[in-house]
Amino acid sequence: MTARSAADTDSLAAFIAGMPKAELHVHHVGSASPRIVAELAARHPDSTVPADPDALAEYFTFRDFAHFIQVYLSVVDLIRDAEDVRLLTYEIARDMARQNIRYAELTITPYSSVKRGIPAPAFMEAIEDARKAAEAEFGTVLRWCFDIPGEAGLESAEVTCDLALRHAPEGLVSFGLGGPEIGVPRPQFKPYFDKARAAGLRSVPHAGETTGPRTIWDALDDLGAERIGHGTSAAQDPALLAHLADRRIPLEVCPTSNIATRAVTTLEEHPIRTMIDAGVLVTVNSDDPPMFGTDLNTEYAVAARLLELDRQGVAALARNAVEASFMDDASKAKLAAEIDAYAQAKV
């Protein structure tokens, strides 16, 4: 790399860091920083998770997607009471504010915490208390997506749906489905998505991350997906790409995550350009940032390199996330105008 290109890269990184942003695909427990994970591990010494922040880098090196799920669940096990939940949520918002993330839809898996003994009302109170404090203190607006952990089967779907409908916190906007896709077909979750959608929640399942395009079609046809989490394999199906583009159904793309979980072999092979070239509404996200050694600013820099974007191109990606979000129209217009003003001032 030449000195000039290095300077250009540094300049773009600074632009990204200061840019107002929204994030749509980021997990609650997966956003726990090494400092917070180590603190929780120290509080729960029976855990297999290292209490040394330096040791967590090796612990968070994943052999494949199955190993990632194993490690992820070991961190989930550190969230054992409402105080843990509140601490985690508030600190996530603090980290987001440092990146100029103005709005985030945080994917939460309440089933895991409730099954571990945290009463549903206490869990909801903890996340809402953290949400309100974060907005007041940091200016970062949080909203919730309650997702089904697919690996836990239909029982988890039943519990998650019940929590979303009978114990819904004020910030809840959507209903999702995460976890492994192989051996976890999407259609079986249709009754639960039907109930959630009837109650006004938006449908945002993961699909096509580690399986083929058929999983994405199933998410669209059976779960009424309004956005697709990952959707990596959509690039294999031109008809699917055209369908997504024509109906303006966004993909929540997480480049570094896809490499870390071996869903994609190398960044150079990532299909984000194919998606963009097909006219799909692509948003950039960090997924489980500390676990993957990334953050949203880094993901924008990765996308900028893969797509050969300048500052205005990066700002356009940021506006995609605003468009694809579940903010009300006035809030969308306000944040989009803030991004535009920032980009114009940096020309």
Image: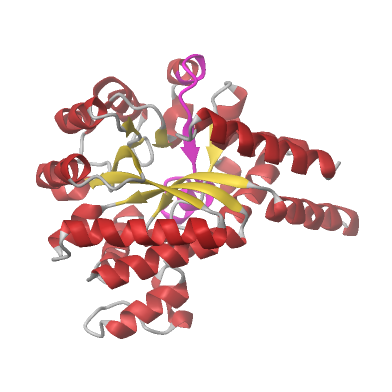
Report the front residue among 87 and 210: 87
Residue farthest toward the left in the current orientation of the protein: 155
Q: Is residue 147 magenta?
A: no
In-image side of 267 versus 81 (left or right): right
Can you say which quadrant of the picture contains the C terminus? top right
Residue farthest toward the right in the current orientation of the protein: 4
- Which colour assignment does the render follow? secondary structure
Residue 69 picture quarter: bottom left
Q: Residue at x 50, y 55 (%)?
A: 135
Q: Residue at x 64, y 35 (%)?
A: 336
Give percent across and percent down for residue 5: 85, 53
Q: Which stretch did the figure color magenta?
A: 244-265
Q: Residue at x 14, y 42 (%)?
A: 162
In-image side of 307 versus 235 (left or right): right
Report the front residue among 138 and 145: 138
Can you say which quadrant of the picture contains the N terminus? bottom right
Q: Residue at x 25, y 42 (%)?
A: 182
Question: Taking 342 as reference, is 279 above or below it?
Answer: above
Residue 178 picture quarter: top left
Residue 216 picture quarter: top left
Give percent across and percent down for residue 85: 31, 66
Question: Taking 149 as reference, is 115 above or below it?
Answer: below
In-image side of 283 versus 206 (left or right): right
Give percent across and percent down for residue 83: 29, 72
